[in-house]
Each structure stands twice: as structure tokens, then as C-alpha cells.
Image (cartoon, grey):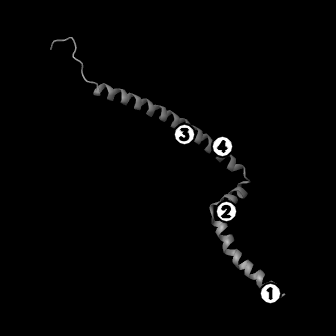
Amino acid sequence: MLGIAIVALVFVALMIPIVAILVDSPLGRSVARRLEGGGSGGTAEVQDLHRKVDLLEGEMEELHRSVVGMKDELQFVQRLLEKPKSSGPSGS
């Protein structure tokens, strides 16, 4: 009987720091926020974040197309500058 009590006491003593670490972790804070807000506030935040991510992805695609266009223009200008001048019909 005494052995079981000692094992239980040691178990509880070891669990206290583990529970404290979990409660103070981001996971513990997330669970606490859901319990306080009833879980409904998280969905609005998640939807807002999805909207922002979609917006940023669209802007990234537009920037990518713009950079590709500028790269093509730069290559064209470089080819024009590197092209040797041909002697034209002018007699200057």
C-alpha cells in the first residue's frame, strides 16, 4: 500500500513540470484561446488569413510575370547593344 502511494506521489511530482511546460507552450495558449472564445473567433481569423494569403499569392504571380517581362526586355536590349553596327548606305 505504501509503495503505491509513493509511486503515485512521484508520478504527480513528475507530471507538474510537464503540464506547466505544455500550458505555457503555443499549443497550450491556442487551446486556452479556443476555450475562452468558444472556438468561433478562430474561424474568422483563419478566413481572414486565407484571404490575405490568396491576395499575396495573386500579387506574387503578378510580380513574377512582371519580372519575366523585364528579363525578356533586358535580353532584347542587350542583343541590340551587342549587335555590330552594319555599314549603311549613308556616306558619312
Q: CA distance from mark 1 to mark 4?
A: 54 Å
Q: Earlier in the sequence, mark 3 or mark 4?
A: 4
CA separation in Å, label 2 and label 1 = 33 Å
> In the drawing, what numbered circle is on residue 52?
none
- The quadrant of the picture occupied by the N terminus is bottom right
Q: Residues within 10 Å of mark 2 (few under 14, many from 20)?
A: some
Sequence-earlier tag: 4 or 2: 2
Q: Mark 4 packing: few (<14 Cα in 10 Å), some, or many (20+)?
A: few
Give the left or right position of residue 90, taking residue 1 as reference: left
In primary-sequence order, the first of circles 3 and 1 is: 1
Point 81% across, 88% down: residue: 2
Measure the alpha-carbon separation of dots 3 and 4: 14 Å
- Residue annotated with mark 3: 56
Task: Say which of marks 3 and 1 sits in front.
Answer: 1
Indicate which disc residue 47 carries: 4
Nearer to me, 60 or 78? 78
Residue 40: give x, y in percent of width and height. Answer: 72, 49
Q: Identify the element where label 1 is drawn.
A: helix
User: The residue under label 3 is which amino acid type?
Assistant: Leu
